[in-house]
Image: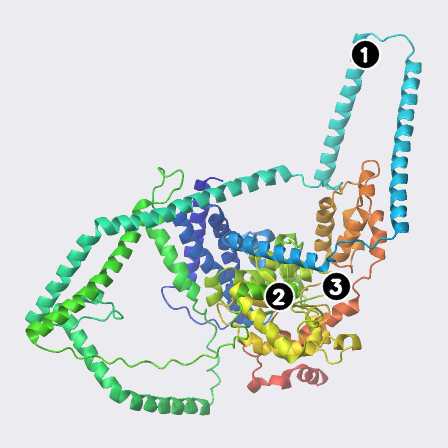
Amino acid sequence: MSHISYNKQWQDAQLAMADMLAIETPAQPRAPETDINAAFQLVATMFVKYVQIFRKLEQCYDQVVHPQKRRLIRVVLDGCMGRLLELKHEMITMDYSEYHYFDDILADLKLTPNDLEIPIPNYFVLERAQAIEKRERLLGQILARMTLDNEKPDGTTTMSIDDAIRIVQTHERARQGRLRAKQIRDLRLNDQRARQRANMGDSKMDRGLAATIIQKYYRRHVVQKEAKKFRDEEYMFLGMAMPTFHKDPLKRLHAEVRAHEDERRKRQEKHEINYQQSLIATREKIKQTEGPDMKERLQDQIRQWFIECRNVSKKFPDFPDEDDGGSNKIFEKKTVAEVQADLEAKMESKGKKGKGDKKGKKGKKKKEKKGKKGKKGKKKKKGDDDEGWTLPESEFVTGMIKPSTETYQNFWETRDETHNFEQNYDSEIVKEEKRSEVVEEIRVEVDALMREELKNLKAAIDKTKEKKKKKKKKKKKKKKKEKDLTPDRTIESLYEELVMNRIIIRPPKVTLNDFIGDFNYLPSLIRQAKHEPMPTMSDAKQLTALYGILPLGSEKVHEIAPQIKGLLICGPKGCGKHMLLHAICNELGANLFDISPKNIFETYREKEGIKMLMHLCSKVGKALQPTIIFIDDCDKLWKKKLKPEEKQFEPKRLGKALPKWLKLIKPGDRVLLVGITNEPYQGTVKPMMKVFPRCILLPRPEYGTRLLLWKTLIPKYNGIITPSLDVTSLAKLSDTYSSGHIHDTIVEVLTERRLAKMAKHPLQASDFITGLAHRNPIYKDEETAFKSWWKKTPTGKKHERFLEEQESGEGDGKGKKDKKKGGKGKGKKGKKGKKKK
């Protein structure tokens, strides 16, 4: 794609954003929505539309070369990202469910399930590439030093003479075997050639006849190949045969696209360097050429103001403080008399504040307390609670999206760039930006000079002494800070200690796209049948992006968006919990801290050890953010009865320390605590969900995901899917097995020896059945245990109550029953009573 295509895509995204702003900030206030289902449908539709805008803006920001355009796109991209997180949070507060389904909205908007996939912005890693590379180099050096320390210092081996002789004999026998095999192969070739000569005899074939025979066989081969290809294509078109999947049929095309994208990123870096150099050079040039004139003009204007004020009020005025705007306040659209009146009123109010502040504050506090008590005492009427739902205001919309959209509409939308084919920076915009900076800098200097000049004028002409203004220091509330247990140590030394103790580990190279999952196509029909649909792997993938990656990727987004401190990833064995954790780390370029009880019990024991560990994680994690802190088998931290082998790790001690530590994580600290467990139902629900307020429940893979796994993983490991391999049967037979079971079976079957035979003996379903049979499936009891545990969680309880209210038509649709209408009395018992009557 050229820059014209990306500009067109940016234009489409901005048009869609303008439509969303019309919904977010209407000209007239929208009436409150009393129907909770209609309100949820509105928020869900906005979420889907914001995802489409986010996808376009992410691609534009990644590939647009123009440095000034990229800055504007970045602001809108961050605002759109933050708005997505806010809408997801709003949907959770409305129906109390982590998983939401948009199949009906996709059908209305004529979108595909792939359009709902949330991309991960590349700038999360690319803009921190140097810092990540430096950190990886340091981590590699420390790990290499650890391996050297573990080896013996003398470097001598302890191999016995018998072992050495046995190794020499083995290698010698292998060498002789290879020579013998080569001799036998040569003998067979010689015999074969001799037999061919004997069959041909001494007579030589005519060259024309030989050429005719070769042509005949070659033409027959070509025709047979074309006929077979045509027949296979027809069968595939009719759905009578499965398509043949090779390792990567579009590998060359993907490589070309990636090379083109990398080339554009290099151009981005080059243009960015030129832009930064232009900013410095333009600022210096404006300061040298226009600075003296600006300074002189500003001084003349302020002196003229002095004279005008003296003519009006018979005395020189007070110069505005820098906090009030300095000389900017003078040049507002006001007359000299109005400016002087404002300054005098401000001085009078300052004098009165010292006396009346204390009494006024006490009176206000008493009135507020009385007002609160009076409000609590009044009972709400029946219609007071039916105000309805309104769309909450968003700081992302008002502070980021709306101003940036207006800038685009006023400047970039109508700008002609036919002459700027290389997409270099616009020098006129640079001059305007730097001129305003230089003006502000000179204004501050001139203000300081004119204050001194005004002071001298007052002393010489008015013969008045300037009253010293005593500024009262505002008492700042002291915030409780975490005690620094290691004040004399650097971050590098603490980082090395954590690596040496195996707390900081290197995650495997996995991305979120490597996590395979299919979309749920029928949730609306399932809900119409009054059943709650099970989430799919695609839903879990989306939640991972919304909970674990997008909030931590951008500093501005993390400061404003709803904060997520703890994330629980649970599900049966082999469903991809650790893969999601590693994907979060790699997509963010984050550090990974492993504080599992099994990992820390040797180095950080007892209460003091846990305290020191949490301090190190907090200090190093905040210094090198984003940071992911990981606890494996986190259910044991709140398990009621521990096994003897589990008690030695003292997991409950860590569980008690976590809630206090989480309070120290403030907005802006990009630190996320991730817990992983196969048995969440073993732990106590309430304390566990306080630490992990957000949960991703990984289900057993459904048919669509299993089919996608077989089709994707077999070519990945050099297998070829031919019509003889019935993948649909494999997907049905692998029911009750996890994604990990399917992956391990494919790796076990596709050995080098089996791949060598694949040309003569294509893969068949029977090759994989044996490997699956040796693995333990996910039984129905385990699935039931997960479902019942989820219903016991705070979110699960509210969701169940919400569904009951929706079915019965009672309550306000917010997970709380109306006690006046029956509350608990109109539950199942009330319905049974009616039936008996």
Instruction: Kindly report the distance in space between the C-alpha atoms of the residues bearing marks 2 and 3.
Output: 29 Å
Task: Please name whichever residue, 388 or 134, is drawn nearer the observer in this view of the structure.
Answer: 134
Q: Mark 2 or mark 1, which is nearer to you?
A: 2
Dividing the picture into quadrants, the one containing residue 547 is bottom right
Q: Which residue position is annotated with label 1?
A: 210
**How many C-alpha atoms fall within 10 Å of the one at disc 1: few (<14), some, or many (≥20)?**
few
Tell me, for residue 123, which label it has, or none: none
| Most distant residue in the front direction | 154
Identify the element where label 3 is drawn. Answer: loop
Sooner in the amino-acid sequence: mark 2 or mark 3: 2
Sooner in the amino-acid sequence: mark 3 or mark 1: 1
Identify the element where label 1 is drawn. Answer: helix
Identify the element where label 2 is drawn. Answer: helix
Task: Please name whichever residue, 173 or 705, is drawn nearer the observer in this view of the structure.
Answer: 173
Q: Is residue 794 at all visible to an observer of this figure?
A: no
Residue drawn where x is 41% and y is 60% of the image: 400
Kindly identify the amino acid type of the residue bearing the numbered disc 1: Ala
Kindly identify the amino acid type of the residue bearing the numbered disc 2: Leu
Q: Position of residue 72 (x, y in %)?
A: 40, 53
Image quadrant for the C terminus?
Answer: bottom right
Kindly identify the amino acid type of the residue bearing the numbered disc 3: Lys
Evaluate if marks 3 and 1 touch, with contact meaning CB atoms under 8 Å apart. Answer: no
Q: Is residue 562 at all visible to an observer of this figure?
A: yes
Q: Is residue 454 left or right of residue 677?
A: left
**How many C-alpha atoms fall within 10 Å of the one at disc 3: few (<14), some, or many (≥20)?**
many
Q: Is residue 795 left or right of residue 641?
A: left
Q: Which residue position is annotated with label 2?
A: 498
Sooner in the amino-acid sequence: mark 2 or mark 1: 1
Q: Position of residue 624 (x, y in %)?
A: 53, 63
Task: Please name whichever residue, 515 or 586, is drawn nearer the observer in this view of the structure.
Answer: 586
Tell me, for residue 573, which label it has, or none: 3
Residue drawn where x is 22% and y is 85% of the image: 352
